[in-house]
């Protein structure tokens, strides 16, 4: 992989009410953002995944948010772009059945000419699972483990069978396979379970809002776990990170903008899940917040810590128009100089 960092945009598949206000983007605007991202030099777009509105969102907004299915959205974007990688950040595996998901992902990879990146995870909000599966006891971490084991069989064997505690299928012939071999699968999340999955069941890692020290330590732990499981450094592995971008004329202006945004409130809502134990210091230190020069320096520091792709970037903007302006500035001041090797 090129040593220069790559940058991916977080698109509004299921971000209203959380990272952005309600309303924020129509489906046409969401597609426009992806097409614009390719033109501006972004490497990828990352769609998140929710099925039902969270209680804290319902209490804040009078109208329900639009939640678009990420795989259907990415299939549409595939037809409107040529080089943009099409990523999920993240696809919540316990919502789905692996046989159907394998078919959808393989089809999308074929339609796009091998541009799919599959970021996966357990999901941040338990209440969505309780709405879908009321009264059912679920061990989401173990479900994801079994799902990934089954997905690997479906992607690599002509006929696949799997029998686990949660996932079962028998003599499934799923064809065609994805174009990419192996397909990039990133374990999403900041937990110890995510590190283990990244090392043993996936070929990449997608955490969010870590400090440079935390990120470097996480990669080191993944390396240890890979070695223990028989993996090698030669095995393809993509090290990514999801962050928020807030650029201002001064550091203080950038911080003010960040703290007044909907995405800042969303990050604080994750205190008991994704960001558990990580809000004791300022969120500015965990994101790309500052002047252009400060953000460039922060990117270099994260790259030195091992980040290859700044994935699913979210801008501290509360309208589509402002987000598009921020994307253009980021392309001019950040993506362009790094692409030219000026850092």
Image: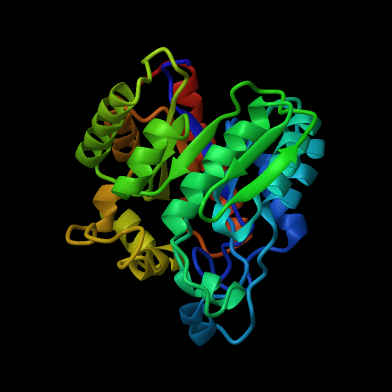
Task: Tell me what residue is drawn at x 59 percent, y 57 percent.
Answer: 49
Check the image and tell me how it is coloured. rainbow
User: Residue 74's spot in the image, x, y percent?
Assistant: 71, 45
Nearest to the observer: residue 44 or residue 29: 44
Nearest to the observer: residue 237 or residue 307: 237
Q: Quadrant of the C terminus?
A: top left
User: Residue 102's spot in the image, x, y percent?
Assistant: 69, 41
User: Residue 148's spot in the image, x, y percent?
Assistant: 53, 41
Task: Tell me what residue is drawn at x 24 percent, y 49 percent.
Answer: 285
Task: Tell me what residue is drawn at x 25 percent, y 33 percent.
Answer: 221
Nearest to the observer: residue 257 or residue 234: 234
Where on the picture, by quarter, is residue 45? top right
**In this picture, residue 20 sits left or right of residue 251:** right
**In this picture, residue 39 sits left or right of residue 326:** right
Where on the picture, by quarter, is residue 25? bottom right
Task: Tell me what residue is drawn at x 63 percent, y 67 percent.
Answer: 51
Task: Report whether residue 168 is seen.
Answer: yes
Residue 312 in the image: above or below residue 342? below
User: Residue 147's spot in the image, x, y percent?
Assistant: 55, 46
Task: Report whether residue 32 is seen.
Answer: no
- The total of numbered circles placed on residues is 0
């Amino acid at each position: 992989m090129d040593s220069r960092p790559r940058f991916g945009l977080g698109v509004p598949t299921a971000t209203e009410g959380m990272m952005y206000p309600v309303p924020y983007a129509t489906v046409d605007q969401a597609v426009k953002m992806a097409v614009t991202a390719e033109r501006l030099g972004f490497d990828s777009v990352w769609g998140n995944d929710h099925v039902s509105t969270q209680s804290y969102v319902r209490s804040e907004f009078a109208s329900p948010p639009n939640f678009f299915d990420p795989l259907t959205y990415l299939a549409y974007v595939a037809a409107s772009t040529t080089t943009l990688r099409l990523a999920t950040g993240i696809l919540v595996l316990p919502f789905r059945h692996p046989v159907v998901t394998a078919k959808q992902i393989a089809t999308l990879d074929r339609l796009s000419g091998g541009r799919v990146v599959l970021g996966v995870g357990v999901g941040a909000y338990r209440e969505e699972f309780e709405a879908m599966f009321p009264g059912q006891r679920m061990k989401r971490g173990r479900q994801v483990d079994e799902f990934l084991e089954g997905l690997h069989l479906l992607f690599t064997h002509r006929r696949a069978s799997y029998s686990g505690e949660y996932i079962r299928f028998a003599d499934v012939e799923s064809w065609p396979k994805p174009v990419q071999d192996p397909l990039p699968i990133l374990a999403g999340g900041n937990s110890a379970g995510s590190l283990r999955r990244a090392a043993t069941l996936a070929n990449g890692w997608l955490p969010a809002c870590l400090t440079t020290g935390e990120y470097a330590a996480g990669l080191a732990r993944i390396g240890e776990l890979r070695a223990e499981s028989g993996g090698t450094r030669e095995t393809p592995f993509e090290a990514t990170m999801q962050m928020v971008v807030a650029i201002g004329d001064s550091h203080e202006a950038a911080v003010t903008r960040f703290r007044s945004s909907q995405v800042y409130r969303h990050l604080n809502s994750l205190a008991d899940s994704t960001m558990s134990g990580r809000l004791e210091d300022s969120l500015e230190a965990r994101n790309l917040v500052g002047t252009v020069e400060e953000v460039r320096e922060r990117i270099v520091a994260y790259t030195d810590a091992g980040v290859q792709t700044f994935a699913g970037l979210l801008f501290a903007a509360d309208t589509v128009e402002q987000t598009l302006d921020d994307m253009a500035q980021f392309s001019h001041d950040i993506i362009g100089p790094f692409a030219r090797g000026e850092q």
